[in-house]
Image (spheres, helix red, strand yellow):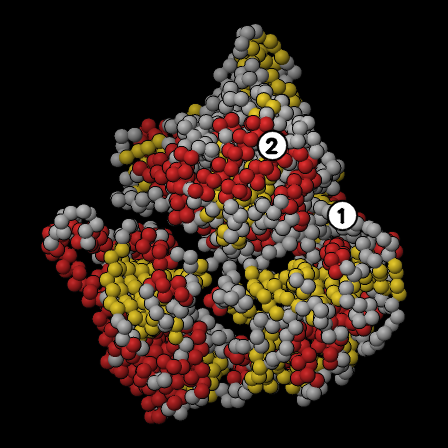
C-alpha cells in the first residue's frame, strides 16, 4: 500500500507576539516551531498501517523550512521524504492545486494528514476534491476490514462518535485527540537519519496578499447580562446571583445513607445512572 | 457575482446559535454588496417554522441529509457546482469542522479562495478584506483578495454577546430544492455512540461534578473523583480548589474558567460564589451538596442536599457499587 | 542499519558537534545523539564567542556561520543608584574584533550540520536514558527509543551542566554546596537593529559587551552583563547562590534593580522581553571539574564543568569548542590504537590542561574568592562615583588634583591600601 | 515571559500607543489640598501605578469651572496656574514607562461639600439622594462650562498629557444633561434626545478645537444609571453611538451608576468581580471605537479573558491597582501568586475620599504615601536580626512579611493550626468571604519568604526566650469582652464569636445587642437572619450598621431588610432576665422591657490579650506590641502596625 503523509510546520509566538519590521511576518526572536499533534497522529497512524500491511511504504511531504523538524518525524517509519519550502506569507489553501499535482501521479492508496495541521486551512478537504478520493475527517481510530475496506471512527464533539465504512483510495484527517502509544524503534530512527530528503520550493501565483499581522482583536463572545426590560433593582439582583434564577429547591437531609439512597434514585430518574 | 451564500447548520430542526450569528453577519455583507442572501442547508436539517424567521432571501435545500454525507464531501461539491450559476461572490459559514469542509471543497471545485478562522470579512476599496486569526490564535492577519476576479469562501468565528435579536425579518423566504448534481464514493454510517466521560471536555460534558472548597483536600479529591467516575461525569472545580492545585486550571468552572452547560450539574462542597454561578447557569438541573444550608449554591439548586460530603460521598459510592478508595 | 559506531557523542551542542566534526574528519564512524528536535534549541539565545578557536578549526567560518554582531567595544562599568562609570576599550580595526555574539539555535544547528556533512550520523529528538557498562567499560548508551541500545567503543558526554550520562557512568562529583554555585539570570530584550546601533554608537554589524558591578547587588557577590546581538540585547546577572541564601535578597530583584538604574535603563528603553532564563553554573572553576575520563568515556564542554564564571558573566562557548576538539582528538588516537581504557583516554586531561582552557580555568580558579569581597559590590562603585564626580567637575569648583580627589573620596570606610589591593585583584580576573 | 496572550500586547488609542491593556481608572483621591493645585503627593500616586506596570493612567476629572468642584481639593482645571504642576504628573508617569490621560468634569448637582456652593443643574432639583437643591443653568452658565472644559483640556495638553477624557458619567453635569429624568429643559438644551446631547456635544467640539485633531479625546460614559428613575443600557448604547458618529471621539471608557447608585460605580465585595463587563462588550458589538471595560476587575486572569473574549480592548482597574500597583508587572513576570488582590471592602479608598480625606487602602499602607512606603522604599536591614513574632493574625503576618523582606530571620508562632486570626472568622460572614484575601495573600508571602512558622504553639515566656531572639513582636490579638450587664452571663447569652464558631445554640428569636456598628454586629445578625432566625437588632447608634462603609451599607440593607428582622436604634440593653431584657433609650433614658427572646447575642468591644507581652517585657532586648494586642481595631490598623514595626526592625 502506498501511503502519503502531509505535514505542516507550524509556528507560533511564545508570549506576546513580535513582528518583523514590515509587519508581514513574525519576528523569529520569540517564535517557536512545532508540529501539530494531529500531524504527528497522522504519521503514527500511517506507521501503524505500514507495520500491519506488507509491502507498504510511506512518503512524507513536509511543508516547512526546518529539516530538523521534519527529521523528528521520519524515525516513525518514513521511506521517502520531501521538504517543500513554502513562504509563510502565503495562504496555504491557494497552493493546494500545486500540491495535488505533485500527489496525483503517485496514485497513493491512502493520504493521511492532521485535521489541525497539514489538513487545516481547508487544505485536506480541497485535496480530496482535487484528487477525487473519499474524505474522512476528525478521525480517531482506523481499522482494516479487507484490502480496500476500512472502518473509521470520527469525533463529532460533545463526546459523540461515529463509525463509518470507507473504501480506498481516501484522504483521512486525524484529529488532535487521536491516541497512539509506542515510540519509534532505534533502527527506524537510525535509518531515518540517513534518508535523503528532497527539497523543493513551491511557488504559485497567489490571489490574496497578506497586508499585515497584528495583535489579535477578537470580536465579542457571548456574555451573561441582566434582562433589559426590568427595573434597576431587579437588574442588580440578577447581577448579584450571576443570573441564576432562584429555584425552589427540593431539600434532602438526614442520615447520609438515606440521603445517598434518595439521591441515587434521583440520578436514576435523571437517567444518569442505569435503573 | 454579488450574491452571498451562508451554509446553515441545524440541531433538532433549529438553526444553531453559531449559524444564526453568521447569518447576521452575512446579511450585512449581502446588503453591502447589493446581492441577495442565500441560505443552504442539508435536507431535513431546518424546520419550516425556523426557516420563516431567518433573515435570508432564498433557501436552498440540498438533495441529501447529513447522514447521507457524513464528512460533507457531497455538499461541498454540490455547492461548488452552483457558484457560477447562482452568481455567488461570497460564501460563508461558521468556523467549525463541517463548515470548513464544505466551503473548502466548494472553493476547490470552483477555483475560489478559501479562508478559515476569520474574525470578519469586509469590503475595502472594492476588494475583500479578510481579517483572520492565525498562528494558533495568537496573531491576527489581514489579507486582501481582489473582488472582481475572485469568489471568496470563508469560515467565520462566531461572535455576538447574545444581546441583540438575531433576525430582523423583512421578506418571506423562497425555498428551492436543489437537484442532485454530483455523486461519488461516500462513507456509510455504521453507528453513532457516546464516548466515555473522562474523554469529554468540561464544556461539552453532559454531566458535570464540581469539587468545591468544602472538600478541598486529598481525601475529598479521591472521593469526588470516584463518584464522578461512577456516574460517568466530568470533574471540574471551583476557584479555591484550582488555586490550591487539586485540579489543573483547565478544570476551573466559572466566569474566568469554563462555562459549563451540562444536563446535570452536581456541586459538592461548592459554596457558590457569583463567578462560579455564572459558569453553571446554563445547566439544566443543578444539584448542590453542602453542609451549610445557606450556601448560595443550595439556593439556586433544583435539589439541595444538606450534609457532610465526607459522609454522603462514601455512602453514594457504596450505593453505586464502587469500592471505597479512602 | 547497524547500531554500532566508533564513538557516540551525547549532545549536539558546541562541544558535542566540535568533537564529532573532529572525529568525522578523521574518518571515524560517529553518532551524535541530541535530545532536542533542533540542535541548540534548548540553549539560551545569545552568547559571546571569542574567535581564535574557530579560525583554526573551520577556517571559512566567518563567511558561513550565522553571526549576530562583532564585538568592537568592550567595557567595565561601576554602577551606583544614580551614576554609571564606564571604562571602555574600543577599536575600529576590522581584524581587531576578537569576539562576536551569536544566536545559539542558528549557530549550533550550523555546527551540527558541519559534522553531518563530514559524515557523522545525527539522531535528534532522542533521549539518552542510561549508559551500557560491560566489565567496567562504557560500551554504549540506551536511548528512549524501542530497542534503543547503541554501541560504541567510546562515549563522549557533551550533554550540558547536569550531565546525566556522566552521572550514570559514575564520573560526577556530588554534594555541591550553594556557595560553589553561581546563578545566572538572563533576559533577552528585542529592539530594532537601528535603535541598538544608535544607542550604543555602533555601525553595521559591530557590537559591544559590558560587564558591571555596583550597588544593585545589594551585598550579594556577583556582577551583571549587557551585550548586543543583531536585534536584541542580552542582559543579566550572575550571583553566588550561597551569598543569596545568606542575605535573603531576591535574585530576581537584583536584576530588576540593575535594569531600573537610570543609566542602564536608557540602554534598554522600549525593549520587549522575548526570553527569560535562569541557570546554575559551577562557580569555582577547576575545583568543580569532575573526573574527565573513564574506561570508554570522556566528558567535555559544560558537562565537564568547563564553564568560567568570571564573576560578571558566564563564558563557556569557547571552552566548549576547544574541549570538544580535544576530546575528539583523543578519541581518534585511542580508536586507532584500539584501546579505550581510562589510562589511554587520560591524555585528554593532559591536552586540556595545556590548552588555553586549562590555563584559563586555573587563572579564574580564585575569582569567586575575590568577588566574595563585599567592598566590590558596595563601597567601590560609590567611591568611583565620587571620584568621577570630583574629577569631571559636576560641581562648579576648581578641579582638584586626582590625589586629593582620591583622598576625599576615601574618607569613608575603605583604606587606600585596601583599595589598591582589591583593585589589583579585580583587574586580574576581568 | 508572561502567560498572557493579550494583556501585555500594545494597543493604540488614536496615535498614542499604550504598552499594555491595563488602564488605571480615574477616581478622586483627595491627595491634593484645598487650594486645588496639583501636588507632588498625587503625582507620586499616579507614577507608582505606572511604575507597577499600568499602561495608561487616567487622572480623575479635574473641575472645568469653580462651580463644578465637588470638593475644594479637586484640581482647578480652568486655572492656567495648574500647568506646571500637571507637567510634573505627566513627567513622572512618563518616566515610569506609562502614558497619562486627564479627565475633565463638572460636578453639576453632585458634591462632597456640606454645605456646598451653588450647584448647577439642567433643571432645578436636587440629586435624589441629596438634600441640596440646585440652580437651573442659564445660558451664561452653559457658556462658562463649555469654556471651562476647553481650557482644562488645553491645560492638560500643555502639561504634556497624552490625551483627555470628558466625563459623561456617574457624578457630573453632562450625565444629568443627557438623562431624561434630570433634564426637563424646554430650550435647545433639553426636550429631545438631540437637545439633551447638545451641551455634551458642544463641550466635545470645544475640547476638540482646543487640543487639535490628532489628540485623543475620550468619553467616560455612564451606560446604565441603575436607579429607578434613570436610563438603562439601551439608552446608554444610543449615547455611545451618538458620540461615535461625531467622529471627534477617540475612545469610550465605560461606566455605570450615578451619585444615587454610587454602589454600582464602586461595587462592594458582594458584587461579582467584572460584573459590568457586559456593558463594554455590548458596545464592542456595536461601535468601532476602542473600549475600556470597568467594574471590580481585580485579577489578571480575568482581565485576560475579557480581552480574549473580545469584550473590551482595555481593562480598567482602579481599586485593584490601589491595593497592588505592581499587579501588571507581577502578572507579566508570572508572579500572579504575589498579587495583593483588592477585596472591595471600600473602607480605605472610597469611604475616605467621600469624606474628602486622602485615599488609603486597608491592606496596602503605601497608598497616598508612595514616597515613604512605595515600590522600592523597603530597605534591607543593616543588621540582620533573629525575630520571634507571636500570633499569626493580620498584624503578626504583616510584620513577619516586612521583616523577612528586609532580610531578618523570622520565626512566627501561632497557637492555632492555621494562620489568619480573626479574619478567618470575619470571612465566614455572609458576602464577606473575600476578606479572606487579606490573609491568604500574607500567608502566601510569608511562606514564600521562608518565614519559619510553628503551628499549635501556645507561646509562653520560655518558648519565646528559647529561640534566643533579638526582637520579640507580640501580636496575640484580642478576645471578646463579656456583656457587662445584669444577666449578661446567662446561658442563653452568646457573643458573636460563639455564633460564628458554631458554639452557640441559638433559638428562633434573638435579641441582638450591637455596640459595634460594623460587620461584627451587622454581619453576624445577617448570618442569623439568613438562617431564618427572627432578629431584633438593638444598638445605641442612630441606625444599625452605622459604621459600615456606605456602599457595603446599602447592599447590607438591601439584603437585611428582606429578612425577618426588627431594628431598635438609640437603645442600649441595661439588663437581661430569662427571656426578656430591659432597654434604655440613650436620649430620653426611658426604660422599656421587651420579652419573648430565646437567645441574646452581643457584639461588644474586644479586649487586648496582653499576658505574654507583660511577662516578657524587660526580659528581651527589644519587644513590640502590635495589632489588637495593643488596642483592638480593624484590619487596616493591624496591617499598619505590622508595616510600621516591620520597617523599624
Crowding at dot 2, Cα within 10 Å, few <14 / some 14-19 / many 20+, comes out as many
With D407 as the anchor, is C140 left or right in this view? right
Looking at the rendering, which quadrant does residue B79 occupy?
Answer: bottom right
With D376 as the anchor, is B38 left or right in this view? right
Real-space CA distance between mark 1 and mark 2, rounded to the nearest whole angstrom? 28 Å
Observer able to see residue D479: no
Helix, strand or loop at label 2? It is loop
Helix, strand or loop at label 1? It is loop
Q: Nearer the viewer, residue A120 or D72?
A: D72
Looking at the rendering, which quadrant does residue B28 occupy?
Answer: bottom right
**Residue B217: x and y, percent?**
56, 48
Q: Is residue D207 above or below residue D180?
A: below
Crowding at dot 1, Cα within 10 Å, few <14 / some 14-19 / many 20+, comes out as few
**Residue D206: x and y, percent?**
55, 39
- Residue at 49% x, 39% y is D153
Q: Chain of mark 1?
A: B
Q: Nearer the viewer, residue D438 or C78?
A: C78
Observer able to see residue D192: yes
**Residue D207: x and y, percent?**
53, 40
Q: Confirm whether circles 1 and 2 share one chain.
A: no
For residue B165, which numbered disc appears in the image? 1
Q: How many marks?
A: 2
Which image quarter is the C terminus of chain D in?
Answer: top left
For residue D258, which numbered disc appears in the image? 2
Q: Is residue C310 above or below residue C65?
A: above
Q: Chain of mark 2?
A: D
Q: Is residue D368 above or below residue B61?
A: above
- Residue at 62% x, 12% y is D594
**Residue B81: x and y, percent?**
81, 73
- Residue at 85% x, 53% y is B171
- Residue at 37% x, 53% y is C256
With A126 as the anchor, is C345 left or right in this view? left
Amino acid at each position: 500500500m502506498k501511503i502519503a503523509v502531509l505535514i505542516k510546520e507550524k509556528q507560533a509566538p511564545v508570549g506576546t507576539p513580535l513582528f518583523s519590521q514590515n509587519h508581514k511576518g513574525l519576528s523569529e526572536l520569540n517564535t517557536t516551531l512545532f508540529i501539530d499533534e494531529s500531524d504527528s497522529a497522522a504519521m503514527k497512524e500511517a506507521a501503524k498501517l505500514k507495520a500491519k500491511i506488507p509491502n507498504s511504504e510511506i512518503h512524507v511531504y513536509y511543508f516547512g523550512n526546518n529539516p530538523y523538524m521534519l527529521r523528528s518525524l521520519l524515525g516513525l517509519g518514513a521511506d521517502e521524504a520531501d521538504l517543500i519550502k513554502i513562504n509563510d506569507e502565503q495562504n496555504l489553501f491557494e497552493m493546494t492545486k500545486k500540491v495535488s499535482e505533485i500527489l496525483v501521479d503517485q496514485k497513493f492508496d491512502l493520504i493521511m494528514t492532521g485535521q489541525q495541521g497539514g489538513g487545516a486551512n481547508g487544505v485536506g478537504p480541497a485535496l480530496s476534491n482535487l484528487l477525487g478520493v473519499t474524505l474522512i475527517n476528525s478521525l480517531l481510530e482506523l481499522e482494516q476490514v479487507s484490502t480496500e475496506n476500512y472502518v473509521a471512527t470520527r469525533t463529532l464533539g460533545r463526546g459523540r462518535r461515529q463509525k463509518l465504512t470507507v473504501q480506498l483510495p481516501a484522504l483521512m484527517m486525524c484529529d488532535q485527540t487521536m491516541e497512539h502509544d509506542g515510540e519509534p524503534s532505534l533502527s527506524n530512527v537510525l535509518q531515518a537519519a540517513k534518508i535523503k530528503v528532497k527539497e523543493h520550493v513551491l511557488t504559485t501565483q497567489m490571489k490574496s496578499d497578506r497586508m499585515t499581522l497584528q495583535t489579535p482583536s477578537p470580536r465579542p463572545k457571548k456574555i451573561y447580562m441582566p434582562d433589559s426590560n426590568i427595573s434597576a433593582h431587579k437588574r442588580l439582583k440578577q447581577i448579584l446571583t450571576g443570573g441564576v434564577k432562584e429555584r425552589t429547591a427540593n431539600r434532602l437531609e438526614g442520615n447520609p445513607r438515606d440521603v445517598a439512597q434518595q439521591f441515587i434514585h434521583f440520578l436514576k430518574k435523571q437517567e444518569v445512572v442505569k435503573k | 457575482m454579488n450574491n452571498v451564500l451562508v451554509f446553515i447548520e441545524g440541531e433538532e430542526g433549529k438553526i444553531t446559535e453559531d449559524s444564526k450569528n453568521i447569518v447576521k453577519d452575512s446579511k450585512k455583507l449581502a446588503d453591502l454588496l447589493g446581492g441577495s442572501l442565500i441560505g443552504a442547508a442539508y435536507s431535513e436539517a431546518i424546520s419550516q417554522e425556523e426557516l420563516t424567521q431567518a433573515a435570508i432571501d432564498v433557501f436552498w435545500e440540498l438533495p441529501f441529509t447529513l447522514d447521507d454525507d457524513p464528512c460533507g464531501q457531497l455538499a461541498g461539491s454540490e455547492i461548488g457546482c452552483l457558484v457560477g450559476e447562482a452568481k455567488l461572490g461570497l460564501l460563508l459559514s461558521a468556523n467549525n469542522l463541517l463548515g470548513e469542509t464544505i466551503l473548502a471543497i466548494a472553493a476547490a471545485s470552483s477555483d475560489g479562495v478559501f479562508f478559515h478562522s476569520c474574525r470578519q470579512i469586509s469590503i475595502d476599496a472594492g476588494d475583500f478584506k479578510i481579517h483572520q486569526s492565525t498562528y494558533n490564535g495568537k496573531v491576527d492577519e489581514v489579507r486582501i483578495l481582489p473582488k472582481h476576479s475572485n469568489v471568496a469562501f470563508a469560515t467565520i468565528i462566531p461572535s455576538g454577546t447574545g444581546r441583540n435579536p438575531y433576525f430582523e425579518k423583512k421578506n418571506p423566504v423562497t425555498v428551492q430544492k436543489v437537484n442532485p448534481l454530483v455523486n461519488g464514493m461516500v462513507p456509510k454510517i455504521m453507528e453513532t455512540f457516546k464516548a466515555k466521560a473522562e474523554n469529554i471536555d468540561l464544556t461539552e460534558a453532559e454531566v458535570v461534578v464540581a469539587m468545591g472548597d468544602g472538600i478541598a483536600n486529598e481525601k475529598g479529591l479521591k472521593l469526588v473523583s470516584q463518584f464522578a467516575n461512577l456516574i460517568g461525569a466530568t470533574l471540574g472545580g471551583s476557584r479555591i480548589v484550582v488555586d490550591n492545585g487539586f485540579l489543573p486550571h483547565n478544570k476551573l468552572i466559572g466566569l474566568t474558567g469554563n462555562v459549563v452547560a451540562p444536563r446535570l450539574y452536581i456541586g459538592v462542597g461548592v459554596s457558590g460564589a457569583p463567578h462560579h454561578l455564572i459558569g453553571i447557569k446554563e445547566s439544566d438541573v443543578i444539584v448542590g451538596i453542602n453542609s451549610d444550608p445557606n450556601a448560595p449554591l443550595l439556593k439556586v439548586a433544583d435539589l439541595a442536599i444538606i450534609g457532610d460530603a465526607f459522609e454522603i460521598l462514601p455512602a453514594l459510592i457504596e450505593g453505586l457499587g464502587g469500592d471505597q478508595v479512602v | 542499519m547497524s547500531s554500532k559506531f566508533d564513538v557516540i557523542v551525547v549532545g549536539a551542542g558546541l562541544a558535542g558537534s566540535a568533537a564529532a566534526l573532529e572525529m568525522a574528519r578523521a574518518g571515524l564512524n560517529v553518532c551524535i545523539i541530541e535530545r532536542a528536535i533542533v540542535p541548540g534549541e534548548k540553549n539560551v539565545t545569545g552568547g559571546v564567542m571569542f574567535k581564535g578557536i574557530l579560525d583554526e578549526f573551520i577556517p571559512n567560518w566567518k563567511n558561513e556561520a550565522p553571526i549576530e554582531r562583532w564585538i568592537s567595544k568592550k567595557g567595565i562599568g561601576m554602577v551606583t543608584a544614580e551614576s554609571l562609570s564606564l571604562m571602555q576599550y574600543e577599536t575600529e580595526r576590522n581584524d581587531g574584533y576578537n569576539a562576536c555574539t551569536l544566536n545559539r539555535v542558528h549557530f549550533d544547528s550550523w555546527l551540527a550540520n558541519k559534522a553531518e556533512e563530514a559524515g557523522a550520523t545525527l539522531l535528534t529528538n532522542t533521549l539518552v536514558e542510561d549508559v551500557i557498562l560491560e566489565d567496567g567499560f562504557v560500551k554504549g548508551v540506551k536511548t528512549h527509543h524501542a530497542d534503543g541500545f547503541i554501541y560504541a567503543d567510546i562515549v563522549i558526554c557533551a550533554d550540558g551542566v547536569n550531565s546525566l550520562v556522566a552521572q550514570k557512568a559514575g564520573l560526577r562529583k556530588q554534594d555541591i554546596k550553594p556557595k560553589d554555585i553561581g546563578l545566572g539570570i538572563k533576559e533577552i530584550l528585542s529592539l530594532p537593529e537601528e535603535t541598538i546601533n544608535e544607542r550604543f554608537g555602533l555601525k553595521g554589524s559591530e557590537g559591544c559587551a559590558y560587564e558591571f558591578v555596583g550597588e544593585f547587588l545589594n551585598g550579594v557577590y556577583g556582577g551583571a552583563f549587557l551585550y548586543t546581538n543583531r536585534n536584541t540585547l542580552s542582559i543579566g546577572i550572575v550571583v553566588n547562590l550561597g551569598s543569596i541564601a545568606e542575605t535573603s535578597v531576591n535574585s530576581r530583584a537584583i536584576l530588576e534593580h540593575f535594569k531600573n538604574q537610570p543609566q542602564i535603563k536608557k540602554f534598554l528603553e522600549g525593549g520587549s522581553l522575548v526570553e527569560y532564563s535562569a541557570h546554575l553554573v559551577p562557580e569555582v572553576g577547576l575545583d568543580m571539574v569532575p573526573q574527565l575520563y573513564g574506561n570508554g568515556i570522556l566528558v567535555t564542554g559544560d558537562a565537564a564543568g568547563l564553564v568560567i564564571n568570571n564573576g560578571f558573566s558566564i563564558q563557556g562557548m569557547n571552552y566548549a569548542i576547544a574541549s570538544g576538539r580535544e576530546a575528539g582528538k583523543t578519541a581518534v588516537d585511542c580508536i586507532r590504537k584500539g584501546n579505550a581504557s581510562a589510562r589511554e583516554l587520560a591524555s585528554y586531561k593532559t591536552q586540556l590542561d595545556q590548552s588555553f582552557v586549562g590555563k584559563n580555568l586555573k587563572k579564574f580558579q580564585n575569582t569567586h574568592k575575590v568577588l566574595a569581597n563585599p567592598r566590590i559590590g558596595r563601597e567601590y562603585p560609590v567611591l568611583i562615583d565620587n571620584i568621577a564626580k570630583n574629577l569631571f567637575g559636576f560641581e562648579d569648583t576648581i578641579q582638584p588634583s586626582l590625589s586629593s580627589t582620591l583622598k576625599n573620596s576615601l574618607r569613608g570606610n575603605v583604606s587606600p591600601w585596601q583599595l589598591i589591593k582589591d583593585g589589583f585583584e579585580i583587574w586580574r580576573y576581568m | 515571559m508572561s502567560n498572557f496572550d493579550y494583556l501585555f500586547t500594545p494597543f493604540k488609542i488614536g496615535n498614542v500607543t499604550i504598552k499594555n491593556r491595563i488602564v488605571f481608572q480615574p477616581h478622586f483621591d483627595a491627595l491634593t489640598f484645598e487650594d486645588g493645585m496639583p501636588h507632588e503627593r498625587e503625582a507620586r500616586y499616579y507614577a507608582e501605578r505606572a511604575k507597577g506596570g499600568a499602561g495608561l493612567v487616567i487622572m480623575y476629572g479635574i473641575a472645568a469651572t469653580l462651580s463644578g468642584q465637588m470638593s475644594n481639593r479637586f484640581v482647578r482645571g480652568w486655572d492656567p496656574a495648574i500647568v506646571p504642576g500637571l507637567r510634573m504628573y505627566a513627567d513622572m508617569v512618563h518616566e515610569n514607562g506609562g502614558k497619562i490621560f486627564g479627565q475633565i468634569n463638572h460636578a453639576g448637582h453632585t458634591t462632597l461639600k456640606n454645605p456646598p456652593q451653588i450647584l448647577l443643574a439642567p433643571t432645578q432639583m436636587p440629586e435624589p439622594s441629596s438634600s441640596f437643591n440646585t440652580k437651573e443653568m442659564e445660558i451664561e452658565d452653559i457658556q462658562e462650562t463649555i469654556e471651562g472644559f476647553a481650557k482644562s483640556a488645553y491645560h492638560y495638553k500643555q502639561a504634556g498629557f497624552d490625551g483627555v477624557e470628558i466625563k459623561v458619567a456617574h457624578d457630573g453635569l453632562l450625565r444629568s444633561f443627557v438623562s431624561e429624568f434630570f433634564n426637563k429643559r424646554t430650550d435647545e438644551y433639553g426636550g429631545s434626545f438631540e437637545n439633551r446631547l447638545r451641551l455634551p456635544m458642544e463641550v466635545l467640539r470645544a475640547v476638540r478645537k482646543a487640543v487639535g485633531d490628532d489628540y485623543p479625546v475620550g468619553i467616560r460614559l455612564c451606560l446604565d444609571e441603575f436607579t429607578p428613575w434613570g436610563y438603562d443600557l439601551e439608552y446608554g448604547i444610543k449615547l455611545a453611538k451618538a458620540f461615535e458618529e461625531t467622529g471627534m471621539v477617540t475612545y469610550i471608557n465605560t461606566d455605570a451608576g450615578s451619585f444615587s447608585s454610587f454602589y454600582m460605580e464602586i461595587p462592594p465585595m458582594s458584587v461579582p468581580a467584572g460584573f459590568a463587563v457586559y456593558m463594554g462588550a455590548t458596545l464592542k458589538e456595536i461601535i468601532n471605537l476602542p473600549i475600556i471595560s470597568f467594574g471590580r476587575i481585580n485579577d489578571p486572569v480575568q482581565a485576560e479573558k475579557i480581552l480574549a473574549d473580545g469584550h473590551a480592548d482595555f481593562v480598567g482597574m482602579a481599586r485593584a491597582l490601589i491595593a497592588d500597583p505592581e499587579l501588571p508587572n507581577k502578572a507579566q513576570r508570572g508572579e500572579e501568586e504575589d498579587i495583593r488582590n483588592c477585596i472591595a471592602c471600600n473602607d480605605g479608598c472610597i469611604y475616605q475620599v467621600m469624606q474628602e480625606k486622602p485615599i488609603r487602602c486597608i491592606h496596602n499602607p503605601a497608598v497616598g504615601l508612595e514616597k515613604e512606603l512605595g515600590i522600592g522604599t523597603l530597605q534591607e536591614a543593616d543588621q540582620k536580626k533573629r525575630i520571634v513574632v507571636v500570633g499569626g493574625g493580620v498584624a503578626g503576618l504583616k510584620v513577619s512579611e516586612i521583616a523577612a523582606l528586609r532580610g531578618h530571620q523570622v520565626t512566627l508562632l501561632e497557637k492555632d493550626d492555621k494562620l489568619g486570626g480573626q479574619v478567618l472568622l470575619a470571612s465566614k460572614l455572609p458576602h464577606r468571604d473575600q476578606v479572606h484575601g487579606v490573609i491568604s495573600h500574607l500567608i502566601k508571602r510569608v511562606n514564600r519568604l521562608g518565614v519559619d512558622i510553628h503551628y499549635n504553639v501556645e507561646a509562653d515566656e520560655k518558648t519565646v526566650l528559647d529561640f534566643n531572639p533579638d526582637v520579640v513582636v507580640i501580636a496575640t490579638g484580642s478576645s471578646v469582652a463579656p456583656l457587662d450587664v445584669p444577666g449578661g452571663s446567662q446561658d442563653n447569652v452568646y457573643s458573636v464569636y460563639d455564633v460564628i464558631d458554631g458554639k452557640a445554640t441559638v433559638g428562633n428569636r434573638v435579641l441582638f445587642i450591637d455596640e459595634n456598628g460594623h460587620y461584627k454586629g451587622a454581619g453576624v445578625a445577617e448570618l442569623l437572619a439568613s438562617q431564618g432566625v427572627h432578629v431584633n437588632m438593638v444598638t445605641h447608634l442612630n441606625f444599625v450598621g452605622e459604621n459600615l462603609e456606605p456602599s457595603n451599607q446599602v447592599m447590607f440593607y438591601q439584603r437585611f431588610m428582606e429578612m425577618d428582622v426588627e431594628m431598635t436604634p438609640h437603645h442600649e440593653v441595661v439588663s437581661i432576665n430569662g427571656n426578656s431584657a430591659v432597654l434604655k433609650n440613650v436620649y430620653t433614658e426611658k426604660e422599656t422591657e421587651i420579652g419573648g427572646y430565646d437567645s441574646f447575642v452581643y457584639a461588644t468591644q474586644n479586649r487586648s490579650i496582653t499576658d505574654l507581652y507583660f511577662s516578657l517585657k524587660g526580659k528581651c532586648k527589644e519587644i513590640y506590641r502590635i495589632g489588637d494586642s495593643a488596642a483592638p481595631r480593624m484590619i487596616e490598623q493591624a496591617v499598619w502596625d505590622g508595616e510600621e514595626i516591620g520597617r523599624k526592625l
